[in-house]
Amino acid sequence: MVKLKTGIKSFDDLIGGGIESGSRNILYGLPGTGKTVFAMQFLWQGLKEGETVAYDVMDKPFPRLIAYFKSFGWNIEPYIEKGKFIAIQAFPHFEPYPKDPRVIYFSLDDFEEMKRIDRLISKKHVTRFAAGDFSEQLFSLYDLKYMEPVEDWTINWCHYDNIVNIDIMTAATQKDVTTQRATDLDLNKAHNIFYFRFNEEKCQRELRIVKMEGCQHPLEWIPFKITNKGIELLRK
C-alpha cells in the first residue's frame, strides 16, 4: 500500500506521509468544522499529482461545489473536461431543475446500481474518492440489514481497488437509537477516523486523529485554520 498526501504537509508529517491507499476514512464533526475543506484539499492534491479523483456531491448542486473549490484557488474545471475529476450524485434529482451533464446520477436505495457506479469509478483508475457531506441521520433512514452489506462492499471495494475512500459525516445534535446504531456501524468498520470540532473557549477549529491503522499518531486535539489556500495546522 502507498501513502497518498493530503495536501496539508504538516498533517502528512504526523501520519507518516499521508493516508494509506485502500483505506476507508471517516471525517466526523458538526457543520463548519472543516471536514469538507479537508476532503477537497485531499482531492486537489491528487489532481496536482496527476491522479484521477471522484466526488459524490450528495445533495449539492455541482456548480456550487466547483465555486467552492475555486474559492481556495483550486480550479477543477479543466480536470472535469479531461475526465480526471468525476462527479456522481447519490441523492435523487429534483424536477424541474435540469440535470448536470457532468454528473453521474444514481440512487442510494439501489445497492446493485451503487456497486455498478463503484466499478465504473474503478475502471477509470480513480485513486481518491470523497462523499458528502451528509448528516449521520441519513443512516437512520435505512435498515441496518441493508446498511451492513453496503459498508462491507465499500470496505472491500476501496481495499482491492486501492482507493482512499473518505466519507464526510456531519454529526447530529440530537440522536435517536437508530441513528446511533447506524453511526456506530459506520465508525466501527472504518480504518481511519478523524474528528473535527470548534473550540468555543479558544475560538479555533481543531481536529483529532481518533484512529489510524498501522500508524503512530498524536492523540490530542490539533488546532488549525482555514485560509484562502486551504487548511493549515497551527501545531508547533
Image (spheres, rainbow, N blue to C red):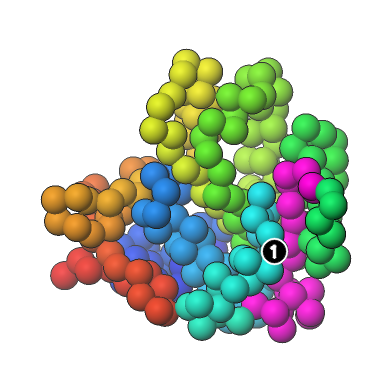
User: Pointer 1: what residue?
Assistant: 62
**Looking at the rendering, in which quadrant would you find the C terminus?**
bottom left
Residue at x-position 70% and y-position 27%:
149
Q: Is residue 9 visible?
A: no
Three-letter amino acid code at the position of disc 1: Phe
Q: Residue at x 19, y 50 (%)?
A: 200
The reply to whether the magenta stretch includes residue 84 is yes
The spot of residue 229 in percent (x, y) is 42, 79
Instruction: Where is residue 94? Give x, y as percent.
Output: 79, 47
Q: Residue at x 31, y 53 (%)?
A: 207
Classify residue 1 by image quadrant: bottom right
Total count of labels? 1
Vertical position of residue 204 compared to residue 229: above or below: above
User: In screen coordinates, is 210 left or right of 27?
Assistant: left
* Depth order, front residue of 188/44: 44
Q: Report x, y in % for residue 134.
A: 56, 44
Question: Where does the magenta region start and end?
Answer: 76-94
- Against 133, is 3 above or below? below
Q: Residues within 10 Å of mark 1 (few under 14, many from 20)?
A: some
Seen at 85% across and 40% down, the residue is 113
* Residue 236 appears in the picture as rendered: yes
What element does badge 1 sit on?
Answer: helix
Residue 112 figure quarter = top right
Residue 55, percent from left and from top? 66, 59
Q: Nearer the viewer, residue 38 or 33?
A: 33
Residue 125 counted in the magenta span? no
**Residue 3, above or below 75:** above
- 148 vs 200, nearest the viewer: 200
